[in-house]
Amino acid sequence: MLQFISENKYISAQELATLLGISSHAVEKQIANLKDKGFLKRIGTDKGGYWEVNLENRELNS
C-alpha cells in the first residue's frame, strides 16, 4: 500500500482497493492504522489533498 501511495500521492482509497484486490473498507482500516503508526499523513482535504509517506523518524512526527 505504501508503495502505491509513494508512487501517486493523490491516489484514492477506491483505486488502492482495486490495485490490492481488497475492499475499500479494508483499505480505510489499513490507512487508519498506518496514520496511527506515523507512516502516513493526509495533507489538505479528503478530496483535494494528498498523502505524505514517512518511512523515517515516524515517532517524531506522530
Image (spheres, helix red, strand yellow):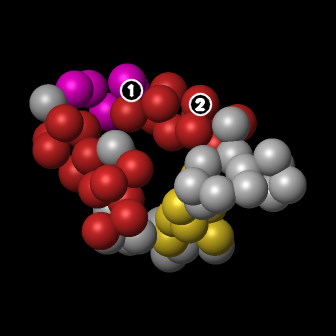
Q: Is 17 drawn above or below residue 52 in the view shown?
A: above
Residue drawn at (64%, 57%) of the image: 56
Depth check: give the residue in front, 20 or 15: 20
In the rendered image, which quarter contains the N terminus?
top left
- The answer to whether any part of residue 27 appears in the image is yes
Q: Give coordinates of residue 36: x percent, y percent.
A: 70, 36
Residue 45 visible to an observer of this rendering: no
On whether residue 15 falls in the magenta region, the answer is no
The residues colored magenta run 22-26
Q: What residue type is labelled 2?
A: Asn
| Residue 9 percent coordinates (x, y) | 41, 70
- The dot on residue 15 is none
> Which of the labelled discs sits on residue 33, or is there none?
2
Q: What element carries label 2?
A: helix
Question: Which of the two discs, 2 and 1, sits closer to the camera?
Answer: 2
Amino acid type indicated by mark 1: His
The reply, left or right, for residue 22 in relation to residue 47 is: left
